[in-house]
Amino acid sequence: MNIEQLETELILPDFTNDNALELGLIIINHAKAQNVPVGILIERNNVPIFNFLMDGTSKEYIQWLYRKKMIVDHYNKSSAFIAARFSPKEIASEVNWLISPLESQVLGGSLPLCIKNVGMVRSITVASTSGILDHEYVIEGVRQFIHLHED
């Protein structure tokens, strides 16, 4: 399954601040089980509603979270989709021409949060040591959250 198709399947039924806490904790528990420290940022309409740095992270993780989130904010697509869509040369010229490389990072780990019958309301972002791993944690967390809230 390609990244874009996966994104269209990860539609949330609803999303409250309490849901952000629940989703954040799902990802934290998944990361703990893998013994990987992560930082997590969940926003709704550009307002942080969940932010957490696990032990073993540093203040640089905050910068990574916001830089990845900037890609989702600009393209309304996951940072993994944009990383797969553009070659490194295109990222260096086209993407960085549109968004400052000091303010963005084209690596996996940030996903638009879309609500059924509403659309994108913002993003969830994970930062660890690998954009690929970060994307997997976000996808797994959202899948588990959706599964828990299925009718």
Image (cartoon, rainbow, N blue to C red):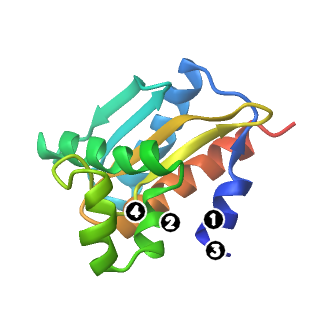
Marks 1 and 3 sit apart, C-alpha to C-alpha, by: 6 Å
Q: Amino acid at mark 3?
A: Asn
Residue 38 in view: yes
The x and y percentages for residue 75 are 48, 51
Q: Earlier in the sequence, mark 3 or mark 2?
A: 3
Along the line of sight, the residue nearer the viewer: 73 or 39: 73
Tell me whether the residue at label 3 lies in contact with that at label 2, contact meaning CB atoms closer than 8 angstroms: no
* Residue 132 versus residue 19 in the image, above or below: below
Quadrant in which the N terminus appears: bottom right
Above or below, comparing residue 147 to residue 34 in the picture: above
Q: Earlier in the sequence, mark 1 or mark 2?
A: 1
Earlier in the chain: of badge 1 and badge 4, it is 1
Between tags 1 and 4, which lies in front? 1
Left or right of residue 118, residue 93 in this image: left
C-alpha distance separating marks 3 and 2 = 9 Å
The residue that disc 4 covers is 108
Q: Earlier in the sequence, mark 4 or mark 2?
A: 2
State whether residue 151 is above or below residue 4: above
Q: Are marks 1 and 2 in contact (CB under 8 Å)?
A: yes
- How far apart marks 4 and 2 lie (CA) works out to 8 Å
Q: How far apart, in angstroms, are the residues tagged by discs 1 and 4?
A: 13 Å
Residue 112 percent across, percent down from the top left: 54, 45
Residue under pointer 2 = 81
Question: What type is the residue that disc 1 sits on?
Answer: Glu
Of 1 and 72, nearer the camera is 72
Helix, strand or loop at label 3? It is: loop
Residue 106 in sight: no
Q: Which mark is residue 2?
A: 3
The residue that mark 1 highlights is 4
Quarter of the picture containing the C terminus is top right
Q: Quadrant of residue 92?
A: bottom left
